[in-house]
Amino acid sequence: MIRSRHRMLPFSLLSLVWTVQAATAQVAGLRQLYDGTMLPGIEVTTFSHADTLQPVRVVHRGVSSQPLAKWYKPFPPIHFEVGGHRFDLYDYLATNRVAGMLVLKDGQIAFEDYELGIGPETHWISFSMAKSIASTLVGVALADGSIRSLDDPVVRYVPALKGGAYDGVSVRQILTMSSGVRWVETYTDPKSDRRRVLELQLAGKPGEVLRYMGALPRAAAPGSVWNYSTGETFVLGAVIEGATGRSLTDYLSEKIWAPAGMEHDAAWWVDGPQGLAWAGSGLEATLRDFGRFALIAAANGHLNGRLVVPEGWFNEAGVPHEIGGKTVDYGYMWWIPPQSVPVHAGAFEAVGIFGQYMYINPRERLAIVVLSARPKPVDDSRDELADDAAFFAAVATALH
């Protein structure tokens, strides 16, 4: 639903308007969402009304927005091959159910498109793209001295985790998801840790998710194995809030959202009234505001000419890491696209289920944001569809 008539309303009032709209249009519940059992129209309504699924806290924009200029060249034709099949831009948009796409070259809009009934005012859920935003806030907290070192123990900032499996785990090991704490991520398995935490989210009792994380057993020595864990990101959010003494949303607003000149307030799921932000998911923002964040990453952490993270932060955050003697294509909660593809050299990306992407290529001065409504949270049947990494490489090559 295009919401241009609400342009001047604050997020809190917009949220009320959207909630009324959502009441007249069907929205899936969280269990149905993670099962991947939504009709296409219901899925779009759900992703664009995610603030009705969980309590949220607002990320306030500043007093003025920073416009994004239009690139001075026509957008070139995009062609690429996957599995012997040839695709173009239109195939990518259609086969991947892309709701919104923004291509930023040299900080300017080279391409912008909205489909599936959404528009520039639509707030769309990030899913795990939020992890990369939260990890960047760790860099900000290092730069301002709130976190002394990535090698600090987690329990220095989250004393509630003392005595459990996270005692002896460093902030760096949380960032690289190598804590060694047992976790099963499988979205569609009702017995997985991810689904058990989902039930705690639905219960809405602040503190219960952190207590669950603190009670998990150890599966391996810290730093010895890599295991993708959304729960780990909840711990990271607690670290940021404990270190800064600020809510994650207020800290994001103060350090990035307001100074970057975002057009709109955003919102972030919390684990209950006055609870902790769900740092691994549930950030809701517009396409262009996700793009403004991506530009900061593409500029290696520079915002309005000032470095907001330590020098060289993204050289650590956006590269593969060796964990337990194995190279993992995962940085500080950023994924690494195939480095065997020359144009991807130095690139990294935030990835969320159902096809959410922020592709960052500093060398090419390129950022691409994709917001999608794919049918399943994880889909292994996409070998002959328009592959994301191949598409991003094609765009980077065409704009080189």
Image (cartoon, rainbow, N blue to C red):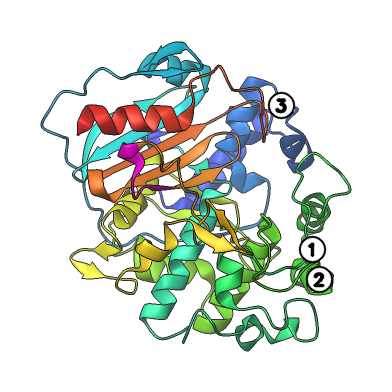
Q: Is residue 231 above or below residue 76?
A: below
Residue that protrudes farthest toward the right in the picture: 191
Spot occupied by residue 306 in the image (x, y as percentages of width and height) = 22, 70
Q: Is residue 53 above or below residue 259?
A: above
Q: Is residue 400 above or below residue 252?
A: above
Instruction: Please tell me which residue is depicted at 52% across the width and 44% down the height of the picture.
Output: 351
Mark number, residue 38: 3
Magenta span: 342-348
Of label 3 and label 1, which has the lower sequence position?
3
Residue that protrudes farthest toward the top in the picture: 85
Spot occupied by residue 219 in the image (x, y as percentages of width and height) = 81, 66
Q: Is residue 344 magenta?
A: yes
Identify the residue under disc 2.
Answer: 218
Identify the residue under disc 1.
Answer: 182
Q: Quadrant of residue 230?
A: bottom right
Q: Nearer the viewer, mark 2 or mark 3?
A: 2
Instruction: Please tell me which residue is depicted at 81% across the width and 58% down the height of the picture.
Output: 200
Q: Estimate the spatial distance between the alpha carbons at disc 1 and disc 2, rounded to whole Å.
A: 6 Å
Instruction: Please tell me which residue is depicted at 46% across the width and 87% down the height of the picture.
Output: 148
